[in-house]
Image: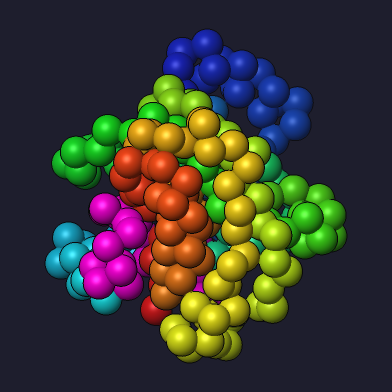
Amino acid sequence: MMFLGESKYFANAFFDFMLPRFCCSCKIKLSPDQETMCETCLSKVQRSTPSRLQREFDRKFSNKKIISDYYSPFVFEKDKELQNAIHLLKYDKKFSVGIFLGKVLASEIKFSGVDWKFDLIVPIPLHHLKKAERGYNQSFYIAKGVSKILNMKVSDRIVKRIKYTESQTKMNLNEREENISGAFQVKASDKVSGKNILLLDDVITTGATISECGKILLEAGANKIYASSIAIAD
């Protein structure tokens, strides 16, 4: 999957001669027409299927009637290519990886056949303590990549995370929903009123966080909430 124009290609060729770039997963040297992850590693990432996405929507979002539709092109697998990339973004400040993943996600959205009309991209916010600890919100950089392809505005100042939540990795759905309840606050209702919003996260697991954030946006007057992530996980 290529995103590079001719000028970018030649710029990469020049800089690669001086300072080679390497795949964020396998560390092989990238060619000038490759960006961040090599084609081999990208091709190994497990893709979601329409039937899997429908099952996930039915299981995670359908009953709540908060999320109108959602899409994730890939399936998260431990110790595989996509986890390598996401971990570099989340824990090693590799912002270019996030932008790359966002570009991949946006291209997959464009060619997936989903018929979404949205006005704004909102990355799921981090609590200010967690953001201070990490230094940044990884989902914001994925959103920036999406915006470059879809030409849509990103705002990370509309929703604020007001509740510090414990890690949800080992929690079941009910525990996650209780943990995330009341975690978000809309700071600018006038900017969401009547709008269709795309909520963006790196990985969607149970959907509890996306649903809670979507709920307060609807309560603030948003029209429809769509959700997307680079990957889904069980």
Which corner quadrant of the image does residue 104 belong to?
A: top left
Image height of 165 relative to 93, above or below: below
Q: In the picture provided, is 55 more to the left or to the right than 74?
A: left
In the rendered image, which quarter contains the C terminus? bottom left
Residue placed furthest toward the top:
7
Q: Position of residue 109 (x, y in %)?
A: 30, 41
Q: How many marks?
A: 0
Residue toward you, 230 or 20: 230
Residue shown at the point (38%, 34%) measured from the top left: 195
In the rendered image, which quarter contains the N terminus? top left
Q: In the picture provided, is 115 more to the left or to the right than 167?
A: left
Image height of 38 relative to 106, above or below: below
What main secondary structure does the magenta stretch of the protein show? Answer: loop
Q: Position of residue 83 (x, y in %)?
A: 54, 65
Q: In the picture provided, is 210 more to the left or to the right than 178?
A: left
- Is residue 68 inside the magenta stretch? yes
- Colour scheme in use: rainbow
Q: Position of residue 116 (x, y in %)?
A: 25, 38
Residue shown at the point (61%, 16%) measured from the top left: 11
Q: Which residues are magenta?
A: 60-82
In this view of the protein, can residue 213 be seen by the observer?
yes
- Is residue 124 inside the magenta stretch? no
Residue shown at the point (27%, 76%) measured from the top left: 59
Residue toward you, 8 or 197: 197
Image height of 3 relative to 214, above or below: above
Image height of 228 relative to 187, above or below: below
Q: In the picture provided, is 179 more to the left or to the right than 47?
A: right
Residue shown at the point (19%, 38%) measured from the top left: 115
In this view of the protein, can residue 44 be seen by the observer?
no
